[in-house]
Image (cartoon, rainbow, N blue to C red):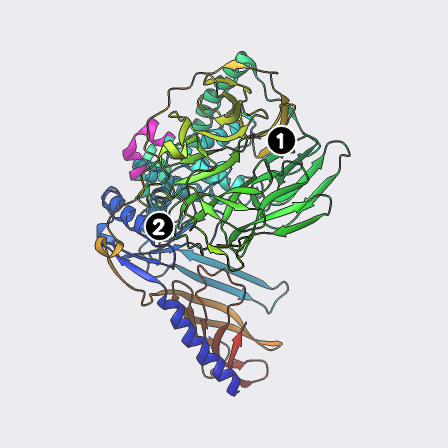
Amino acid sequence: MRRAIFSAIAALFLAGAAQAQIKTIVTDHFRVHYTSGAEGTARRVAETCEEVFPTLAAAYDYYDDFRTIHVIVLDNSDVLGNGWANYYSNTMAIWATSLDFELRGSHDWIKNVVTHELTHIITLNKARKKWPFQFALLSVSRFDSNPDITFQFPLYHLNAPRGWTEGIAQYGAQKFGYDAWDSHRDMLLRMAVLEDDLLSWEEMGTVLDRMGKFYGEFVYNQGYAMMVYLHDQYGAEKVDELTHQIGSMSFDPAIRRVLGISADQFYADWVAFLAENYGRLESEIRAQGFFQGEPMDEVNEGVLEYHPALSPDGKKLAYLTSEKQDYGLTVLKIYDFETRKKTELKGWIDTRIGWSPDGKEIVFVRNKGGFNDLYIYNLAEDKERRISARLRAKDPSFSPDGQRIAFVHNKDGTNNLGLIDRDGTDVVYLTNNNDATQYMGPRFSPDGEWLLFSLFRGEDRDIAMIRADSPPRPKVFEKAKKKKKSEDDEEGEEGEEETIEVFPDTVAFAHPDSSGFRAVVASPADERDPHWLPDGSGFVFSSDQSGIFNIYRYRLENDEVEQLTNVIGGAFVPTVAADESVVYSGYQSNDYSLYRFEMGEYERDAHFEPVVMRDYRSIFDGPKLADQFQTATYRGRNVLRYIPILQVGPTYVGNTFGLNQASGGLQFSTGDMFGGQELTAWGIVGKNMRSATDLNTDVGFFYERRLRPQVGNNRTFNPSFYIAGRRREIDNAIKGSQITADTLDVGNVY
């Protein structure tokens, strides 16, 4: 018992220490709470919140309902950018890591997700009924007959289909230019229409009938497309009016009240509009000459095959696949074209893959505890070796001599280009960004002198180059003076101190004279996924300059570009072997599969606009956070939730029960929004209508205090202290007696 009490006290003390590491930014309308290491993202979140709030609040008449909105900012994951909003508790959570997703285009992540989630808060608060509770439960039961019957009726203060809630949130972000109907979104919708795979009107509300594949994303995509259609065909005022007309029992009457037609007719008109436009586009592409290469049926087995990487000799192919499971759960496979055998590496593996120059090893990224690290796999030995710890790396590639690895480092929502030795030592960074810049897929040139990559700074992706020996970013280089032994002097003599050239910490990378940085393909379109040609004369890449992502070839000698595919869906992440065969990932409805073709099978000249002049070298140099906003240590914020309960029927006691029980009560819970502590309590009073005895009662509570906050915690070991109690007094109509049960429990959970 003494040990349990000591553990409980220690848990409470350490939990307070963990909470003290959370800081708060105070603005006019928001409290932005952020964990250690997420200061830059928290600043951007606070700025965006105050930038977009007045316009959204005015558009949806929200000021009368305003309550301070709390935002949690986390930087505890490299997996996928995400966010959520709880309109009832006025709370949002934003992850710093940018969304780099096969089904979405590139947008300013923080501005996009903040506006999206804030639109949820405002529109759903306006749409919900002003009941004094979020959820209530009516229950009627009869257990003294055959068959037994139970009927439960939930009362919920909001009835809005998911397609609308997600569509209106993305439409809200579009108003500010932070989201757009981009080529990825159009690709998903286009192929769903052309291959008859659209979600029905009912499925857009719940998506319960068709789970798996990409249908969850379809709800977002179709909802957004429908809002754009509503805006274009009926006017922006109809979109806003719909928010105020949502019915308590069904969304369909709101459509009729606002548009004058039924929901089914509105959906049918929208589908007909899409079919006509996309059908015309498909005919145009086929008239030009459709070309996608041959599907690789020997490797295509799941809903997602992506990031292919051909070995230098072209005899093997490494790639990510979801197999028969969810597309977010990928494994790495290596396919041998000669033996037709597959080697599989399991675990949470993501991002691009790199081959060693001799084709004997691959370098890849595995995620553990939320963070990405580098691994090298030896094919002959069938062994993998971890070479980093919490490096937060992605997109690795070997240098031509196999001794260095280029990668992208992720921290506080910003990426930087890095180099590391194959044994995990000597990490240097070639860039010094602090402004949410995103780098993708650095690849060494065949001669080892250059790194080719794509980058994003808020507009669209461009392709650029930098010297592999570019001066590293500023850091303190402390090199001990080395003493060189002389053949004639045993004591030796002092040598010269080693010096390393660096660039100023006020810019993203060294001056182009020494870094060689230059944007190679940087048009208003999206250019991504560059991969060197075997001889280094140029590279292949993916671009949506025609409105559809296709594979292109760029020649460095004369800046000429040729289009190598002409698809209807989309073509991404090309890889080239020594014999110039190309493998890429192509999209059809609800499926990414690998395709292969030989260079020269299809070619047509492509026109890209001249390089857009953009400032790639500047970084954030604004005021310190404390000079820009009021800041404070997080003091905790509890969120209250409660559920009214009304029951008619029996109440159980052991294996017997009372009949004709009528009871009512309330369950409430409150807890810190980071999940550090939680209290749940309830009280129910009932009357057995067949007896004149006292009322039946059921009261109880459960309190838990965690060592570390639950939200934003990646650790599997998170001890907690809990205490719980319950008291029940129930009249038993069958035995004619009263049963009283008391329970008290104290303990620790690990």
Q: Residue flagged by tag 1: what amino acid is it? A: Leu
- Residue 87 visible in the picture: yes
Which residue is farthest right? 339
Q: Nearer the viewer, residue 60 or 182?
A: 182
Q: Is residue 300 left or right of residue 631?
A: right
**Type of secondary structure dominating the magenta stretch:** helix
User: Cα distance, mark 1 to mark 2?
Assistant: 36 Å
Residue at 37% of width from left, 65% of height from top? 21
Q: Magenta region: which residues?
A: 229-240
Q: Which residue is mark 1?
A: 594
> For residue 309, what is the image quadrant?
top right
Residue sitting at 61 percent across and 67 percent down? Answer: 145
Residue 98, image quadrant: top left
Query: Residue at label 2?
Result: 41
Q: Position of residue 692 (x, y in %)?
A: 47, 82
Q: Secondary structure at mark 2?
A: helix
Spot occupied by residue 382 in the image (x, y as percentages of width and height): 72, 47
Q: Are marks 1 and 2 in contact (CB under 8 Å)?
A: no
Of callouts 1 and 2, the N-terminal one: 2
